Image (cartoon, rainbow, N blue to C red):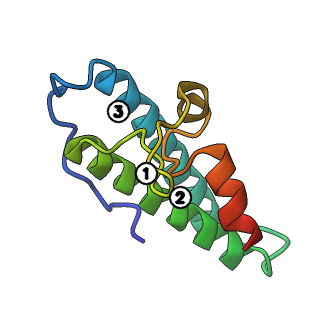
Amino acid sequence: MSLDASRTPPRPELPEHPAAHETRSRLEHARLTSLTQLHTLTHDSHPDEQLLPAHKTAIEQTLQEIDAAFARIEDGTYGTCQNCHTPVPEERLEILPYTRYCVSCRRHTTTT
C-alpha cells in the first residue's frame, strides 16, 4: 500500500447520521496515525528486520479497515455489527472507530 494512497475527501455530513462528522474525524485521525507508522517502518532502519513485514501487514490491514468504515458511513451501516446486526456500543466505536463487530461477536470470530 502506497503512502500516497489517497481516499476521496470526506463528504458532507449525512443528515441521518448526526455524529458523522465526529466519526469521520476519528477515522481520519486513525488513518493518519497508521500512515505515519507505515512511513516510519518503511523509511527508518530497525534492528529487528524480521518483525518489519508483520508490522507493515498489520498497518496495511488497519488502513483497509478504516477505508471500509468510511464506506459503511456512506451506505448507512456504520455502527452496526456485521455479524449479529445489533448496534455496536458507542464506547467501542470511540476506542476502535473502524471496528466491524460488537465485542461479543469479535470474541467469537477470534476464537473460531
Quadrant for the N terminus in the image: bottom left
Quadrant for the C terminus in the image: bottom right
The three-letter amino acid code for the residue at tag 2 is Thr
Percent position of residue 101, x then y: 54, 50
Q: Is residue 79 above or below residue 3?
A: above
The three-letter amino acid code for the residue at tag 3 is Arg
Horizontal arrangement in the rendering, residue 24 relative to residue 105 (left or right)? left
**Could one spot residue 54 in this view of the protein?**
yes
Asked whether 45 or 54 is in front, the reply is 54
Which residue position is annotated with label 1? 66
Q: Secondary structure at mark 3?
A: helix
Question: In the picture, residue 76 is in which quadrant?
Answer: top left
Horizontal arrangement in the rendering, residue 27 relative to residue 57 (left or right)? left
- Dot 3 or dot 1: first in sequence order is 3
Percent position of residue 3, x then y: 41, 61
Which residue position is annotated with label 2? 62
Residue 24's mark? Answer: 3
* Image point (32%, 62%), residue name: 5
Numbered label tally: 3
Residue 79's mark? Answer: none
Percent position of residue 59, x then y: 58, 62
